[in-house]
């Protein structure tokens, strides 16, 4: 499991030239869940999205005591433009470390590697899975597990599981958030970026991430991708089988009609279809799996519209329907405690 206890704080969040907020979701997640660790943001230009942090240059951040420059981007494909290499070299020469969750291993880029060697700076590629991961076994293990699944990417799976884990711990429930993506790992400080794992070992990696535990312990596992995404369904299935989840939470963005990005030809499925598909495939490794709630991103709707829609969906699906931002997740945990 990747552990990031060595990252020096505070952080300078690099937003690159991201125009869409979803392209900077790694930085946004860290800023939201770990605000005290964030010193400022570094944007390529004024058109770049902002997280309402102080804009700082590399030199200014270093002078203010910044420890780590975090590449806070999550573009499709996880590439790293050539123009950013000189920025990373400047960061290392200014005495800071670098952490990146991109698929590109920036620590292997020659100029960055040379600068790290020259300065003694640390370059951490978060999406580097541990060696020696096994194939999945499908064998039952002790402990309880909740997995978030989605109708699409970027619908709130990480946010939902972080909120669920926080509410569990607030109540004294024995729980651990299990990060499966670069943003979650940078927030939690540990995890496995399952989308960087060779497909044969995906379910095994999930078993390693959420090992046998005490009977009262909940692993709250961050979901990835979607079974309905033409590019990323594989990682979702590996998580479903490896998690052997006792409980599923389906995440969905109200008003989203088609798969985000360059996939407009692919419609978002009806919620009942998404529920049935996820439960059916999850039951392969845990026949007792249950849906325990819907977690919605209702930011496209007014408060009144959102609450009315949530009440309607709750009546249809007979499980709690929450928006972690608008309503919190307490109702979902109440249901979970009574029904698992």
Image (cartoon, rainbow, N blue to C red):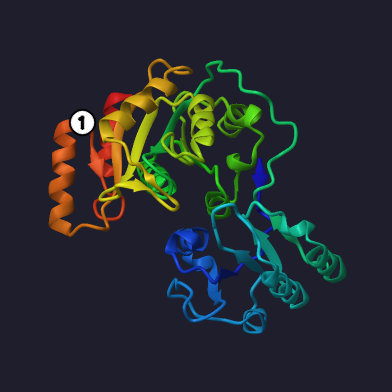
Q: Which residue corresponds to the image point at 17% horizontal and 60% vertical from the top-left? A: 302
Instruction: Give the left or right position of residue 37, taking residue 311 as reference.
Output: right
Whether residue 192 appears in this view of the structure is: no
Regarding residue 182, the answer to whether it shows in the image is yes
The quarter of the rendered structure image containing the N terminus is: top right
- Near-viewer residue (15 or 122): 15
Residue 73: quarter of image: bottom right
Q: Where is residue 222 in the image (x, y as percent from the top left)?
A: 47, 41
284 to the left or right of 333 = right
Q: Residue drawn 44% across and 53% down? A: 261
Q: Name above or below for residue 242 compared with residue 61.
A: above
Q: Where is residue 35 in the image (x, y as percent from the top left)?
A: 47, 66
The percent coordinates of residue 211 (x first, y second) are 58, 28
The one of 113 and 40 positioned closer to us in this rendering: 113
Total residue callouts: 1
Residue 119 in the image, given as x and y percentages of width and height: 83, 71
Question: Is 17 in front, or is 96?
Answer: 17
**Residue at 30%, 55% in the rendered image:** 325
287 in relation to 246, above or below: above
Q: Which residue is at 70% across, 68% downward?
A: 82
SS for dot 1: helix
Q: In which quarter of the image is the C terminus?
A: top left
Residue bearing mark 1: 317
Left or right? Give the position of 47 relative to 276.
right
Pointer 1 local density, CA inside 10 Å: few below 14, some 14–19, many at least 20: some
């Amino acid at each position: 499991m990747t552990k990031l206890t060595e990252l020096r704080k505070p952080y300078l969040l690099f937003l690159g030239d991201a125009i869409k907020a979803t392209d900077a979701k790694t930085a946004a997640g860290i800023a939201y869940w770990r605000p005290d660790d964030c010193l400022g943001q570094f944007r390529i230009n004024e058109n770049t999205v902002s997280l309402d942090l102080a804009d700082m240059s590399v030199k200014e951040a270093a002078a203010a005591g910044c420890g780590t420059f975090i590449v806070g981007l999550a573009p499709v494909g996880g590439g790293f433009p050539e123009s950013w290499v000189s920025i990373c070299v400047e960061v290392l020469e200014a005495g800071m470390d670098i952490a990146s969750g991109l698929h590109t291993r920036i620590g292997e880029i020659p100029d960055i590697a040379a600068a790290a060697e020259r300065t003694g700076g640390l370059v951490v590629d978060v999406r580097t899975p541990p060696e020696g991961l096994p194939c999945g076994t499908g064998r039952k293990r002790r402990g309880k597990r909740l997995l978030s699944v989605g109708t699409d990417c970027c619908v709130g799976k990480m946010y939902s599981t972080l909120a669920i884990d926080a509410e569990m711990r607030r109540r004294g429930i024995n729980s651990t958030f299990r990060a499966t993506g670069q943003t979650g790992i940078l927030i939690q400080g540990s995890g496995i970026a399952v989308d960087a794992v060779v497909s044969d070992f995906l379910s095994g990696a999930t078993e390693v991430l959420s090992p046998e535990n005490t009977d009262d312990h909940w692993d709250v596992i961050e979901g990835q991708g979607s079974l309905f995404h033409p590019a990323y369904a594989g990682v979702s299935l590996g998580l479903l089988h490896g998690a052997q989840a006792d409980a599923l939470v389906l995440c969905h963005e109200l008003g989203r009609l088609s798969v985000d990005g360059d996939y407009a030809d692919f419609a978002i499925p009806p919620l009942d279809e998404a529920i049935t598909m996820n439960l059916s495939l999850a039951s392969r490794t845990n026949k007792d799996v249950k849906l325990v709630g819907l977690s919605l991103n209702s930011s496209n709707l007014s408060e009144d519209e959102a609450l009315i829609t949530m009440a309607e969906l709750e009546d249809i699906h007979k499980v709690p329907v929450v928006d972690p931002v608008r309503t919190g997740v307490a109702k979902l945990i109440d249901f979970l405690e009574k029904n698992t």
